[in-house]
């Protein structure tokens, strides 16, 4: 596409994005791009004090409504075998630490599963119940419940062995310039974090708070919903929530965030 036409189509909002694009591109740095372990910051660090307080104080954190709903669903029998999550797993706290290792490769299913995918699989295979669609309130609630058990624990996904090709695919996507604006994830979240983009401050794009309550959404959403919003922000056609492409990207994000504490449910503007 002609550059001139593209710029003309952008308008004022697009112009600030083009400025970002003109800053050094990730591919141009001599050393390995990315954020050194000591410089990794949670999205929490970029929040206004009142939003941060809302995240930290669980008695006023709106995302806790989903965790509480998840606790109810956890104990509800469902499907052909009339089993609840609790029938097999006991108390939700038994899954403490699990969220820190996801996405993970499942050798039996020969698939990379994120937490949502794992819960969907338990629902189908172990409960033999109606599927929980991605982004449904029930799946968000159960995912928030399971991830919340690991609140404070550092992300620590496996990236070797069978996870390796998925990591490579996710990484490639992170550095690929996307959409009509032709900007990669890295150009915003590696190269320009801390800067302002219109009303927002760009964070490092870390995945450690999901599912997250977002004030703009007036609801809790998955990481994949957030990723789709970023794809749309650069006018790219986003992959579907739950698609293998986004699960691979999620693995790269989790590897890139290694050591950051899980903060589910996070609160964002
Ligand atoms: C009939 C028993 C059974 C039921 C019911 C069940 N699961 Fe599971 N779950 C398993 C087994 C077995 C595994 C190990 C992976 C596998 O073989 O599927 C597992 C694995 C998991 C894991 C990953 C644990 C890890 O260490 O990686 C999560 C999370 C999970 N289940 C959540 C749920 C949730 C949420 C529900 C309710 C919607 C549920 N499970 C219902 C048997 C069950
Ligand atoms: C034009 C700049 C831009 C691009 C390109 C972009 N994002 Fe974002 N992203 C943002 C902004 C702005 C936000 C909201 C404020 C924040 O948390 O950074 C955001 C939020 C996020 C978040 C949520 C962080 C949190 O703590 O809640 C993640 C994860 C994320 N982006 C990942 C990505 C990925 C992966 C890509 C590439 C597919 C991408 N972004 C592309 C600007 C961008």
Image (spheres, rainbow, N blue to C red):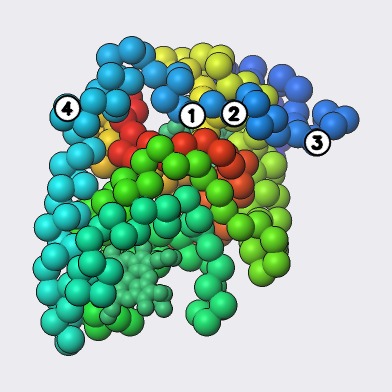
Distance between mark 1 and mark 4 Cα atoms: 20 Å
Helix, strand or loop at mark 1? loop
Name the quadrant containing residue 119.
bottom left
- Asked whether, in this view, residue 250 is left or right of residue 139, the answer is right
Name the quadrant containing residue 32.
top right
The residue that disc 1 covers is 42
Residue 126 lies, with reference to residue 195, above or below; the image says below
Distance between mark 3 and mark 4 Cα atoms: 41 Å
Q: What mark, if any, has residue 40 been given in the picture? A: 2
Mark earlier in primary sequence (1, 3): 3
Q: Nearer the viewer, residue 172 or 115?
A: 115
Q: Nearer the viewer, residue 101 or 164?
A: 101
The residue that disc 3 covers is 32
Coordinates of residue 253 in the picture (x, y in percent): 57, 45
Instruction: Answer whether residue 130 is visible to the viewer in this image.
Output: no
Within 10 angstroms of label 4, few (less than 14), some, or many (20 or more) residues?
few
- Are the residues at dot 1 and dot 4 in contact (C-beta closer than 8 Å)? no
Residue pictured at 17% horizontal, 87% vertical: 80
The residue that disc 4 covers is 60
Within 10 angstroms of label 2, few (less than 14), some, or many (20 or more) residues?
some
From the viewer's perspective, is the residue at label 2 or at label 3 nearer? 2
């Amino acid at each position: 596409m002609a550059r001139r036409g593209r710029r003309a189509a952008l308008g004022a909002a697009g112009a600030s994005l083009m400025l970002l694009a003109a800053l050094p591109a990730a591919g141009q740095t001599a050393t390995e791009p990315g954020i050194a372990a000591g410089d990794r910051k949670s999205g929490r660090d970029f929040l206004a004090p009142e939003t941060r307080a809302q995240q930290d104080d669980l008695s006023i954190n709106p995302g806790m409504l989903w965790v509480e709903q998840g606790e109810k669903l956890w104990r509800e029998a469902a499907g052909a075998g009339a089993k609840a999550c609790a029938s097999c797993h006991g108390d939700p706290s038994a899954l403490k630490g699990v969220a820190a290792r996801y996405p993970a490769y499942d050798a039996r299913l020969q698939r990379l599963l994120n937490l949502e995918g794992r819960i969907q699989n338990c629902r189908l295979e172990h409960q033999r119940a109606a599927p929980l669609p991605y982004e449904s309130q029930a799946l968000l609630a159960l995912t928030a419940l399971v991830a919340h058990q690991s609140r404070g624990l550092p992300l620590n996904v496996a990236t070797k062995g069978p996870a390796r090709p998925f990591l490579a695919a996710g990484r490639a996507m992170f550095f690929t310039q996307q959409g009509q604006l032709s900007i990669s994830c890295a150009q915003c979240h590696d190269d320009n974090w801390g800067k302002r983009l219109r009303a927002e401050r760009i964070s490092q794009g870390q995945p450690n708070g999901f599912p997250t309550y977002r004030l703009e959404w007036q609801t809790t959403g998955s990481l994949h919903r957030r990723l789709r919003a970023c794809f749309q922000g650069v006018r790219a056609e986003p992959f579907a929530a739950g698609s293998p492409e986004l699960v691979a990207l999620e693995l790269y994000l989790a590897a890139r965030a290694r050591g950051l504490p899980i903060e589910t449910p996070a609160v964002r503007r």
